[in-house]
Image: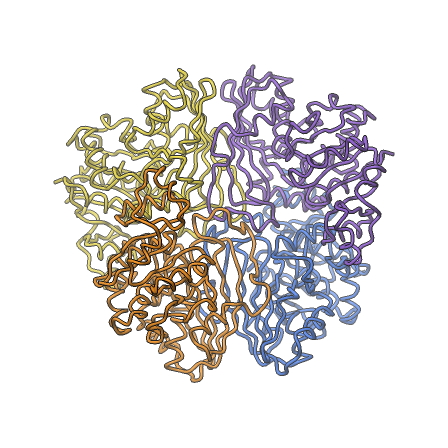
Chain colours: A purple, B blue, C orange, D yellow
Amino acid sequence: MIRVGINGYGTIGKRVADAVRAQPDMAVVGVAKTRPNHEAQTAIRNGFDLYAAIEERKPRFGEAGIKLAGDVDELVDASDVVVDACPSGVGAQNADMYREHDTPALLQGGESADVVDSSFNARANYDTVEGDDLVRVVSCNTTGLSRLVAPLRERYGIEKVRATLVRRGGDPAQTGRGPINDILPNPVSLPSHHGPDVNTIFPELAIDTLGLKVPATLMHTHSVNVTLESEPAAAEVRALLADERRTFVIPEWLGIDGAGAIKELAQDAGRPRADVWENCIWGESISMEGRDLYLFQAIHQESDVVPENVDAIRAVLGTTSQAESVATTDEAMGLDEPLA
Amino acid sequence: MIRVGINGYGTIGKRVADAVRAQPDMAVVGVAKTRPNHEAQTAIRNGFDLYAAIEERKPRFGEAGIKLAGDVDELVDASDVVVDACPSGVGAQNADMYREHDTPALLQGGESADVVDSSFNARANYDTVEGDDLVRVVSCNTTGLSRLVAPLRERYGIEKVRATLVRRGGDPAQTGRGPINDILPNPVSLPSHHGPDVNTIFPELAIDTLGLKVPATLMHTHSVNVTLESEPAAAEVRALLADERRTFVIPEWLGIDGAGAIKELAQDAGRPRADVWENCIWGESISMEGRDLYLFQAIHQESDVVPENVDAIRAVLGTTSQAESVATTDEAMGLDEPLA
Amino acid sequence: MIRVGINGYGTIGKRVADAVRAQPDMAVVGVAKTRPNHEAQTAIRNGFDLYAAIEERKPRFGEAGIKLAGDVDELVDASDVVVDACPSGVGAQNADMYREHDTPALLQGGESADVVDSSFNARANYDTVEGDDLVRVVSCNTTGLSRLVAPLRERYGIEKVRATLVRRGGDPAQTGRGPINDILPNPVSLPSHHGPDVNTIFPELAIDTLGLKVPATLMHTHSVNVTLESEPAAAEVRALLADERRTFVIPEWLGIDGAGAIKELAQDAGRPRADVWENCIWGESISMEGRDLYLFQAIHQESDVVPENVDAIRAVLGTTSQAESVATTDEAMGLDEPLA
Amino acid sequence: MIRVGINGYGTIGKRVADAVRAQPDMAVVGVAKTRPNHEAQTAIRNGFDLYAAIEERKPRFGEAGIKLAGDVDELVDASDVVVDACPSGVGAQNADMYREHDTPALLQGGESADVVDSSFNARANYDTVEGDDLVRVVSCNTTGLSRLVAPLRERYGIEKVRATLVRRGGDPAQTGRGPINDILPNPVSLPSHHGPDVNTIFPELAIDTLGLKVPATLMHTHSVNVTLESEPAAAEVRALLADERRTFVIPEWLGIDGAGAIKELAQDAGRPRADVWENCIWGESISMEGRDLYLFQAIHQESDVVPENVDAIRAVLGTTSQAESVATTDEAMGLDEPLA
């Protein structure tokens, strides 16, 4: 059994904890939190040992009647690998601690690529991170683009990717975030930083990205153009993408018009937290104009990186092959049961 | 075992089907649908026999590769009771069919009170509907108000209720509904029809209501004033409401600021479809000014009537007492496990 | 001519500057800004002399090619009265400066009532502030409630006011404010601070208020209950409110369903910045149940206090009567031309 | 003086009426309406003669106390040219009437290109429509793209345009339109119809477009890629676009982050109805990657076609040159005064 510690138990951490626990070859050592808030209680209710991320704040847990299993140091020490799911920037601050304990750690996509030894996507570069100390599981948007780029590149070759990322303004419970009624170029300067982030996975890829923020909370939506090096029929591309593991090519007859309907599918399918781990690509949208492929895909910002974190655990330790890891992860999580 | 047919398998119907199946004393005979859409497939995937609600459309199901168990007539015939979860107005049209088959039926709150023999809320008038042919389970908002009124009335007496219902514009997947950026008095004429609807449960209650619609999809929020006949301390009222079965008095330390955070609790608690069956009453908001009680509560429009439908099945057939029914329903659904 | 200085040239300040300039008995000495941003340029384009609000930042204006007329001290000195339209909290910090210069100043409703000598609403207490050093023009919501309370109280007597304020989350250009998709009790503790603020204008009034925040930007909407001391017909109340100067009782035939339609009326009427200075009360909503009056009104948070600031200038200096001031203000601004 | 009749007095019609009246060489004969609603009253208040668009409904105007100048037939007869600003599809139905009266007519972009003799954009093809019976002023989005394409094509040559149109879900007062909280690929099939519409202006242009709908009301936003035939510096492109008449290249120092801030500029500039007639192109966003130009532009759906309609009047009658018409239109409307 791989002993996994999880540092940070928020949007990503709590999902990774559940996904890791579901794996046949892994066990959760515990989760670390900075404060005894309601997520700390959720961790305990779910049976995870709780560690204090900040030593000075340990007494607060006691005051809140929450029993601690120890310090984050002890968690790191007891783990074969740590998934760091702390807020952006904190992961980088934790890097020294992981190195000191000689425990490999996975950081999230909000950290800078400069902080880590490598960036990771299970579909694209599973085999390149074994033995690294610090591996970054790329962001939700980069994960979504990488899953799309990998098969297209292998099968048809890619001349250039141009993608507009229409991003949700905040997650459903992030009520302090806007905009309420606007469409914001964000960042205004072009091309956006998302393209270079995809290059951490595909260094040679020609890709330009543009980002916007809109008043929606459920999923990001990508408007994608890929100029291919050959000219397949749209139906062929559709079949190629439908064949991939972590893509869901939305059939037309479902009448899915947006993220609300996708989340409803996930609810009806009994997915935990109504999570949508796959790229959701509208089948009707997949079209070819000459060598220009166009399509729309929706990306669930809260969960698409979760199976990637699970795979990264095996990849960094080198315990199994890519094919075996991905199959195991998906079966254990229920990702291999289609959304509809 | 009570054999339950479900006519309509949309937002309410699919939830009621799952809740009924979970009961120890009930079995789902099948569900009826008008069209072979993706919800029809969900029904089949979930193991429910499918019946055609409209005879002429039966061939369409065959064309879509969906096997039917029969017509809605046969479903009604094979059922001890039918839950009608069709769109507003269709339930009334179905009333004759239920009468012809001599099968008691539950209509939903979108139907007019004139169509039915009685209106139902499990907390308030469980014992009054036994033997009725047509019973209306009142709407999400009326259910939410009834659960609040019942204990206050019993304990303190109520002089008058004044409530402003700040309603969500549409459900998460209803993308054709607005407003996008407005606050709409709705209905503009006052008092609104919601008060008289509460009077179908509490005929003598003095209640005036006002309704608005806003650009939100998750839950309704009620701003409530109740002028009591006595003057309890706020803490006493808080305890009274916390003691009720289908209320969740939100503790202050959770830091819950709105419906997004409540839904996140439901997700973390593993609730199916992240449903919130309880009235969610902000504990901090419960306050007394003289005999005037004030509070805020959030109501999940998609699910708070689901346990009520389950209880109404037993109530109309007279199989068990109110206390036993409610306890059984809640345990079977997991409603008795607190949200946090 | 009354010489008026305006400290702060943002949402309120720029509107007050235009309104003051339009008055036959007033002149704008100049406006003060902290930074040479685009509003500073707007001030110059509109022909207002610009003063630096913060001495150390004066060089920045020069660098931006913007010519200054002097320091804010000089502006205060050259003014008979100053309208302070700085962000909430800054007005209180400026109070000493105004006192030192012996220049009466008007602060805005975001400042605490403790900082000032008196609070002001033109309809309700014009005659009480003459000679005061610091007068607070109450907030948009309190102004809207005061205009409603004054005539009702005079004509019918008021037993109690209960009002739910459904507030816009942010102004149209405040893209950093949320919520995107939620209804937030705000503040959660009840009753809200809005009631005590109305008591700065009507000290003896019994009033309880509740506030919420929703994802809309155009106007606030008030759901109002007033228990009167007598029992007039609704039509009589409608006529009373229609007769007031700064109320617009929306006729039913206009089909106005929300703030978007109201703002469209203001645009079509050629109002500057599509401002809506009046309380917009839905005529259909005005209704009586016993002695309980109910109604909905929409309040334009960016502009309803603008005519109040103009009147407060005359009131604090004692130059004219209430009736004359209000008539002059409204005619000069175009407020006396009805919206439709 | 060119006598102009305006059939339809809604969002576009009322703006065109004001813009035509402001021209030195035009006079408004009158406006036609189907119903005596509040816009009919606005027309009268603004001094426009009112004609009944539907004969059977004439009595309704009398009942509403609104005096008619005649039937729409008479309006068409008395006009040298008619601007048809009726809802989409109605313009096509009116086409026969215009032909019968031998009165040239301008339809709006919601009509099919098949119905008309030609499509029009003042910048791109002013000289091609003289003498046509029916001319279509292309839609807001197509107008916005045409203004961008024309100078780029002339100066650098265009290999291909790829544009993602992030469209507002509805106008500010269209409260029945959604979505409330979603990002909708719309249309789902790609490429969208917008590209072929641009081809009615530039028949040979290679252009693929993608459309989405989001919960915003103020402006559309275009994410644009243009592969040029040469490789100018970004600064050169910026200067080229800034030099155009109906573009506003937003300077970085203004700190404009979205449509809310743009509309605020228009309000502060005293624009009627806060209209933004120009393409608003973020200066910072204009960038070159090889021969790939990228930029963001915002388009005000309610008003950018208004000056185009004015020019189309002169173009179809052949009264002046393009340069003279555009200069006259812009000066008369105030479009030549910059937004900031």
- Quadrant that contains the N terminus of chain C: bottom left
Q: Residue at x 61, y 36 (%)?
A: A299
Q: How many marks?
A: 0
The relative height of residue C129 versus residue D287 in the rendered view (above or below) is below
Residue situated furthest left in the rendering: D1
**Residue D308: percent from left, percent from top:** 27, 36
- Quadrant that contains the C terminus of chain C: bottom left
Q: Residue at x 76, y 29 (%)?
A: A326
Residue situated furthest bottom in the rendering: C230
The relative height of residue A138 versus residue A291 in the rendered view (above or below) is below
On screen, residue C55 versus residue C333, left or right, reads: right
The relative height of residue D152 versus residue C99 in the rendered view (above or below) is above
B109 or A144: nearer the viewer: A144
On screen, residue A167 versus residue D128, left or right, reads: right
**Residue C82: percent from left, percent from top:** 33, 60
On screen, residue C16 versus residue A80, left or right, reads: left
B72 or D138: nearer the viewer: D138
